[in-house]
Amino acid sequence: MMRQLHFRHAVLYDIAHCLLDLFPSDADVSEIGPEQSPALFVSWRTSGVANHPGNIAWGVHYRFEPEFLRAYSALAGDAQREACERVRELSRHLRFEYLDPAAVSLFVVDVTADVIHA
C-alpha cells in the first residue's frame, strides 16, 4: 500500500516519494518550515524498553536551498528523476546504528543547488 503524502510544495512531494524506501515503513514524513523555505522531516522510533539502546527516536531533516527548489521546478521528467537520485545519494551515508553507544539519532541533510548541476 502506498503511503499518503500531503505537501504544499510539489518539489517536496517528489523528493519524499523518491526517499520513502530508505526509511522504515512506519516513518512519518512531513513538510515543515515556512512556505518560502520548506523542509522535509522524516521521523520514526525503534522499539525497545525505555532506557535501552533499541528505544530511540530517529529523525532526518532535509533542508533545501531556495535555489534548489526553483531549479528543480524548472526541470523536465528525466532531469527531475536524476536530481531525486542525487538527493538519495546524499542520504546513503546516514547510519542508524542503535547498538552504537555514540549513535547520532538526528541527521541534517542540506540540499544545495549544486545537486541539480552535479
Image: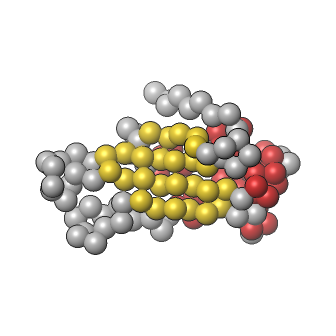
**Residue 42 visible, this angle:** yes
Query: Would you say residue 86 is visible in this rendering?
Result: no
Q: Position of residue 98 (x, y in %)?
A: 26, 61
Q: Residue at x 71, y 59 (%)?
A: 65
The C terminus sits in image quarter:
bottom right
Judge whether 81 appears above or below 65 on screen: above
Q: How is the image coloured?
A: secondary structure
Which residue is found at the position 46% from the left and 62% from the top?
Answer: 107
The x, y position of residue 33, in whole percent, is 61, 45
Residue 52 screen position, x and y as percent: 15, 56
Q: Residue furthest front?
A: 34
Place of residue 117 in the rendered image (x, y in percent of width and height, measured from the top left):
79, 66
Q: Is 69 left or right of 58, judged from the image as shown? A: right
Q: Write the residue at 46% across / 27% down.
A: 1
Q: Relative to residue 47, is residue 66 depicted above or below?
A: below
- Given residues 68 and 51, the one toward you in this image is 51
**Observer-nearest residue: 107 or 34?**
34
Residue at x 42% of width, y 59% of height: 106
When asked about the image quadrant of residue 87, the answer is bottom right
The total number of labels drawn is: 0
